[in-house]
């Protein structure tokens, strides 16, 4: 269900704050199209810290694994990443679907360390919104449909007060991969 309690603007504000605190940089240096690695200097451990901060801010669970790891898990080893640690044709097709066609460097043979540079503030924000939009129609605890947000970030049931139960980022990626497979027959 597309929720309307947490706005895109609020997600971007919290995302900027989380990135700025994790990377110890100025908020003004963070733009939607900024690459977390290429422009902002994030390293692998920084992603864990940023994700943790977002989870705390929104009461969600971010993906623990990158989309390519899920491809390998679901469709088999070597389906997205070859034996040399490079992107396969199918892996490149999936990433273009996921990240958009505006990445000219995204092609078969791309090394994995170059792929993390494609993660932008905007793409991370889309991940947060996807999770928030997995808000169930009714509360999983009491069954009522009385969602509210006191702070514009965390959603809770207005009837029983319990926090909303969202799908995890990993579950949403797996669901997306299955849907793409059904529609596009990439694998």
Image (cartoon, grey):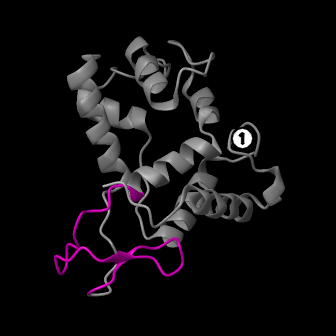
Label 1: state its secondary structure.
Answer: loop
Q: What residue do we see at 57% from left, 29% from top?
A: 115
The magenta segment = 132-159
The picture places residue 137, in percent across and down from the top left corner, at 24, 64
User: In this image, 126 relative to 146: left or right?
Assistant: right
The picture places residue 35, in percent across and down from the top left corner, at 69, 39
Q: Answer yes or no: is residue 187 visible.
A: no
The quarter of the picture where the C terminus appears is top left
User: In this image, 114 relative to 172: left or right?
Assistant: right
The residue singled out by tag 1 in the image is 34
Q: What residue do we see at 47% from left, 48% from top?
A: 127
Instruction: Determine whether 26 is above or below 153 in the image.
Output: above
User: In this image, 41 relative to 150: left or right?
Assistant: right
The picture places residue 21, in percent across and down from the top left corner, at 72, 65
Instruction: Determine whether 32 is above or below 106 in the image.
Output: below
Q: What residue do we see at 56% from left, 55% from top?
A: 8
Q: What residue do we see at 54% from left, 20% from top?
A: 101
Instruction: Determine whether 178 is above or below 6 in the image.
Output: above
The picture places residue 30, in percent across and down from the top left corner, at 76, 50
Secondary structure predominantly adopted by residues drawn in magenta: loop
Instruction: Determine whether 156 is above or below 104 in the image.
Output: below
Q: Is residue 162 magenta?
A: no
The quarter of the picture where the N terminus appears is bottom left
């Amino acid at each position: 269900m597309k929720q309307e309690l947490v706005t895109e603007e609020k997600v971007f504000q919290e995302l900027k704050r989380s990135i700025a605190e994790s990377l110890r940089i100025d908020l003004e240096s963070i733009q939607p199209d900024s690459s977390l690695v290429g422009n902002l200097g994030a390293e692998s451990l920084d992603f864990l810290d940023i994700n943790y901060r977002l989870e705390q801010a929104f009461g969600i669970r971010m993906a623990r694994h990158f989309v390519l790891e899920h491809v390998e898990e679901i469709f088999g080893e070597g389906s997205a990443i070859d034996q040399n640690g490079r992107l396969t044709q199918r892996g490149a097709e999936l990433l273009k679907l996921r990240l958009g066609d505006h990445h000219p460097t995204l092609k078969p043979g791309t090394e994995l360390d170059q792929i993390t540079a494609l993660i932008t503030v905007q793409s991370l924000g889309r991940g947060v919104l996807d999770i928030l939009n997995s808000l169930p129609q009714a509360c999983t605890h009491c069954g009522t449909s009385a969602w509210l947000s006191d702070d514009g970030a965390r959603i809770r049931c207005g009837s029983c007060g319990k926090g909303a139960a969202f799908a995890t980022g990993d579950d949403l990626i797996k669901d997306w991969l299955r849907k793409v497979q059904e529609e596009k027959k990439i694998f």
